[in-house]
Image (cartoon, helix red, strand yellow):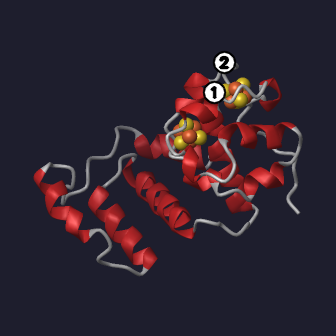
């Protein structure tokens, strides 16, 4: 049983009047078990656990299309972020473990310098999956297009100080 009283980054889901504009514009809606407007509805009526156990929160690509389309300015993308966080901190079983592994690898990498080092990200993700050669056939094309760099990018200026405040707010 999941405690249903948590905030969604100040998003007031009760403003939703179920117009479905968010779902109509979502590029990955057809792979979701609950559509974005259904997620918001679950939260609005206090059925948080429905949203938390859905595949949808792990399928969401974070593209912000829904948030831009919402006539009530509900930031549905942030709601999805918060639901993922809550799912992890509540130790709920993730229905898409490979997505969770990617999410964890991505966050770990971005915490290093504020920018992603794609080569390391892909390597670490593949190791987590136990498939070291997963998608390796894409690497030559990505190198040629300059999308895969051997050396990591420079850290964002002031990133260490800024990230300490963000991830350790007591400091
Ligand atoms: S677009 Fe906004 S108001 Fe419409 S269903 Fe989605 S969240 Fe609700
Ligand atoms: S942010 Fe997520 S839910 Fe919203 S439109 Fe993009 S993929 Fe769909």
Q: Is residue 53 visible?
A: yes
Q: Nearer the viewer, residue 47 or 115?
A: 47
Q: Is residue 169 visible?
A: no
Residue position for label 2: 71
**Secondary structure under the numbered disc 2 in the rendered image:** loop
Relative vertical location of residue 10 with respect to residue 38 in this rendering, above or below: above
Q: Quadrant of residue 149?
A: bottom left
- Residue positioned 71% across, 58% down in the render: 87
Mark on residue 68? none
- Image quadrant in which the N terminus is located: bottom right
Q: Nearer the viewer, residue 108 or 58?
A: 58
* Precedes in sequence: disc 1 or disc 2: 1
- Residue positioned 36% across, 47% down in the render: 115
Q: Residues at badges 1 and 2 in contact (C-beta under 8 Å)?
A: yes
**Secondary structure under the numbered disc 1 in the rendered image:** helix
Q: CA distance from mark 1 to mark 2?
A: 8 Å
Mark 2 Cβ and ligand 1 under 8 Å apart? yes
- Residue positioned 10% across, 53% down in the render: 144
**In the image, farthest residue toward the top:** 71
Within-10-Å neighbours for mark 1: few <14, some 14–19, many 20+: some
Residue position for label 1: 21
Residue 81 in percent (x, y) is at: 62, 45
Relative vertical location of residue 165 with respect to residue 143 in this rendering, above or below: above
Residue 99 in percent (x, y) is at: 52, 62
Relative vertical location of residue 40 with respect to residue 114 in this rendering, above or below: above
Q: Is residue 167 left or right of residue 8?
A: left
Mark 1 Cβ and ligand 1 under 8 Å apart? yes
**In the image, farthest residue toward the bottom:** 130
Mark nearest the camera among 1 and 2 is: 1
Q: Nearer the viewer, residue 23 or 147?
A: 23
């Amino acid at each position: 049983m999941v405690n249903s009283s948590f905030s969604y980054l100040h998003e007031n889901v009760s403003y939703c009047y179920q117009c479905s504009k968010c779902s109509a514009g979502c590029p990955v809606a057809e792979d979701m078990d609950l559509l974005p407007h259904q997620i918001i509805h679950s939260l609005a009526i206090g059925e948080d656990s429905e949203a938390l156990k859905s595949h949808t929160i792990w399928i969401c690509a974070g593209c912000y299309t829904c948030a831009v389309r919402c006539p009530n300015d509900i930031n549905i993308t942030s709601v999805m972020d918060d639901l993922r966080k809550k799912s992890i901190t509540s130790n709920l079983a993730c229905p898409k473990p490979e997505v969770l592994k990617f999410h964890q690898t991505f966050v770990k990498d971005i915490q290093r310098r504020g920018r992603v080092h794609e080569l390391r990200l892909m390597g670490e993700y593949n190791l987590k999956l136990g498939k070291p050669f997963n998608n390796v056939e894409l690497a030559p094309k990505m190198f040629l297009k300059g999308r895969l760099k051997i050396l990591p990018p420079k850290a964002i200026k002031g990133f260490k100080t800024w990230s300490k405040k963000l991830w350790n707010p007591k400091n």
